[in-house]
Amino acid sequence: MSEMDINGVLAHLPHRFPFLLIDRVKELESGKRILAIKNVTINEPFFPGHFPGRPIFPGVLILEAMAQAAGILIFKTVDRTPDDSSVYYYAGIDKARFKKPVLPGDQMEIEVTIERSLRSVWKLDCQAKVDGVLVCEANIMCTVRTEIQS
């Protein structure tokens, strides 16, 4: 199992601020699973509007954080890093359930396990927890495509 600091995260994801949602990787087993961290702070750019007086981390961004953790796992599994021609897409989201709000000050632990891959489509089981309590779960499908630059 390996860990990854923010520099490793940046090397394995094409995302950047303000859309980078993974701060650190605690555990990574290539071809199997990843345990990643998202530190939720009040400084996030969406909190003034989601919601004024009651900041809640948006559920769609929890799903995006899951996809980003999955992306790191996939890129490590295929022993590649993203480049300008790599585009990482959602291919599907199934069984997404939100169990509890995520608030500023929370540390989300995102665990992603590979269920299977076929060609360039990956199916993954994802869970997000705060203090060991499940806040979101989903099955996602992702794909990495190489696009010709024009």
Image (cartoon, helix red, strand yellow):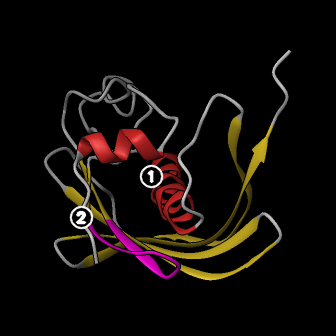
Image quarter for residue 140? bottom right
Location of residue 62 in the rendering, given as x and y in whole percent from the top left corner: 44, 54
Q: Which residue is mark 1?
A: 65
Which quadrant: the N terminus?
Answer: bottom left
> Going from the N terminus, do you reach mark 2 or mark 1 first?
2
Q: Residue furthest front?
A: 79
26 versus 84 height, above or below: below
Q: Is residue 30 magenta?
A: yes
Between the C-alphas of marks 2 and 1, the distance is 17 Å
For label 1, the SS is helix
Location of residue 54 in the rendering, given as x and y in whole percent from the top left corner: 26, 38
Left or right for 28, reference 139: left
Q: Is residue 125 magenta?
A: no
Q: Residue at x 43, y 28 (%)?
A: 16
Q: Which residue is mark 2?
A: 3
Q: Which mark is residue 43?
A: none
Q: Looking at numbered disc 2 in the image, what kind of residue is underneath it?
A: Glu
118 versus 130 height, above or below: below
Q: Residue furthest top?
A: 150
Residue 99: in sight, yes or no? no
For label 2, the SS is loop
Q: Which residues are magenta?
A: 26-35
Of circles 2 and 1, the one toward us is: 2
Q: Main secondary structure of the magenta part?
A: strand
